[in-house]
Amino acid sequence: MSRPEALSPLFRSLHSIKGVGDKLAALLTRYFGAPEGQEAIALDILMHMPSGVVDRRRQVGIAEAYLGQIVTLRLHIDRHLPPPRGREHIPHRVFAHDDTGDVQLVFFRAQGGWVEKALPIGEERFVSGQIGFFNGEKQITHPDYIVEPDKFATLPLVEPVYPLTQGLSSKALAKLVRQVVDDLPLIPEWIAPATMAERNWPRFADAMRMVHLPASPGEAELWAPARQRLAYDEYLAGQLTLQLIRSTMVAARGISRTFTGLVTAKVSSTLPFALTEGQLQAIGEIRADLASPDRMSRLLQGDVGSGKTVVALMAMAAMAESGAQSAMMAPTELLAAQHFKTLKPLCDSAGLGCELLTGKMPAAERRAKLAAIASGETTIVVGTHALFQSGVEFHNLGLTVVDEQHRFGVHQRLALSDKGKHTDLLVMTATPIPRTLVLTHFGDMEVSVLREKPRGRQPIDTAVLSIGDYDRVIARLRARLDEGAQAFWVCPLVEESEHLDVVAAEDRFAELQKALGDQVALVHGRMSAAAKQEVMQRFSANELKLLVATTVIEVGVDVPNASIMIIEHAERFGLAQLHQLRGRVGRGSARSACLLLYKDPLSETAKARLETIKSTEDGFEIAEKDLELRGQGDVLGTRQSGMPGYRLAVPDVHRHLLDYAHDEAKDLLKRNPGLAGAEGEAARTLLYLFRKDLAIPLIRAG
């Protein structure tokens, strides 16, 4: 179905709106970030929410107009006092009065006689602006509005204030907004009448009018019914999209798997430790998914070191029992190699064929591996996303396991599931994602959570110190290394940048080498994979004692003997990052320590961040706090990756509406999977309004 005709006025280019020339249209297209080759449209203006409201309703006499207030006065214009010639820095003053007192209107650099025209002597004018004082006299500098008494209706007494960009005036934007709002078409209602009544919500068009052209400041407040309704609409559009993706994934029927229990029993018996409660529960949930005829689409969340890899292995072993292969994808070759290192010995002892496939291997070796995958001899394949490029043929791929999913958006999830036509999907993430974000980004997936740490993990002592204590830190570090400990030292940048007063990794490495000799090595993002690998191997083998690194080591480095983590310029890292980095130690039997070095002065937010890390090791608590301190795009590192950013909903204020939207989207598609009839048409209109047309083709007939 194509876009409903009623919405056409909102999808017209801004050029077609009166008063918008090429220059303004180009400016707005840039400002609203329209897709390549497209122009900004009326809908962009409609969805551009005011950041506040100016209240000009205080219409008083001059005597009751107090300092700092915004007032609207009816004035009699008495005389003009322009600046002397050549003295441009002196303002043009206009003297005026009403029955209660006198006021001056002040204009700087007012050339061309427009002030005299706007405020003719002997006439009356309505003037609105902020009251100031100068030499004991009341004045308004550059009034916001000057209107003739018979045009009073054109003065906006309640005026929304919008975020602007260089070259865009608030007057020009306000004019555009009014035109777009006045042309709002009548659209079908997608919220149930009972819900509307219960929450006291206005219709969509009325809500937009209240937010953009409020009669009172209260109408436009974030928590007022109008804005709540619009936030809910935005959440609902997002949730419907995710549910449609889910129904597409699940609808492509999966295969109902049966298990013999033989391979999983073998794997369990070869594990060097007992599985935790959480792991057993997650494995149970995954097995139930695999056994059902629907496709699995599950997110496995667990903090660093909570044992996600083992859960994935048990899923892959169960898959092998049903005669199918599994693929495990990691974001980098370093990580793929690490997973392989963990899995290979366990697979060998359980008789499972497990292979690593990377882009760097010699052609002959690669051919042999590809043949083993195609014949089904290899049951488990580990690699990067190169696994899903052409040339890799599976004998019978049943399960795809993806590590560190938050780097993949919804599109990638869809593309990925195409390779194995009916493959089940298990996504693992070490970023503890707060519930709100799970709903907004992964509402199409079921979730399993591993909360406890595996047995034998050591608690980590975390301390916060100023970089001023550098010498003390080195002395203490030297003593610990002499006792046989290994340590990480993390720096934020690779090379000296003039803008940031940060000791770069290379300089710090040189300093530390001076102090501690050649047991120190450096690894950073600009090194070749082979060079990195070599340093990491020497560190793992305990030939090196101290590894200076940029955040390359954030994800998935496993060196059980390393028990000290020093993070320099800790104030520059986000909470999630600090938590991930700290999780690199405490993996062996030794008591571990994490030292956060900061540089003064610290901002309030940075203080709060360091305090949080110091006080808790619970990743979920940290993630919730991160959400509070930074807002949602940052937690998932999605500021850049085009994940859903909200324009109408403000998560801090409207978070409670997300649950409603999630449930309503689920119910709607259960009731009406093809979005048929009037109800369906209203829902499709909502999807078009919020530009979720990506989801429209996914709507199944009946």
Image: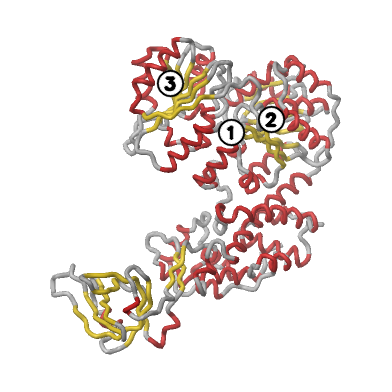
- Badge 1, how many Cα within 10 Å: few under 14, some, many 20+? some
Relative to the observer, which residue lies in front, 414 or 215?
Answer: 215
**Disc marking residue 618:** 1
* Three-letter residue code for mark 1: Asp
Q: Position of residue 18 (x, y in %)?
A: 47, 75
* Three-letter residue code for mark 2: Val
Relative to the observer, which residue lies in front, 647 or 563?
Answer: 563
The C terminus - image quarter: bottom right
Residue where numbered disc 2 is placed = 392
Residue 418 visible in the snapshot: no
* Three-letter residue code for mark 3: Leu
Look at 19% across and 79% down and name the residue there.
81
Relative to the observer, which residue lies in front, 691 or 115?
Answer: 115
Q: Quadrant of residue 203?
A: bottom right
Residue where numbered disc 3 is placed = 522
Q: CA distance from mark 1 to mark 3?
A: 30 Å
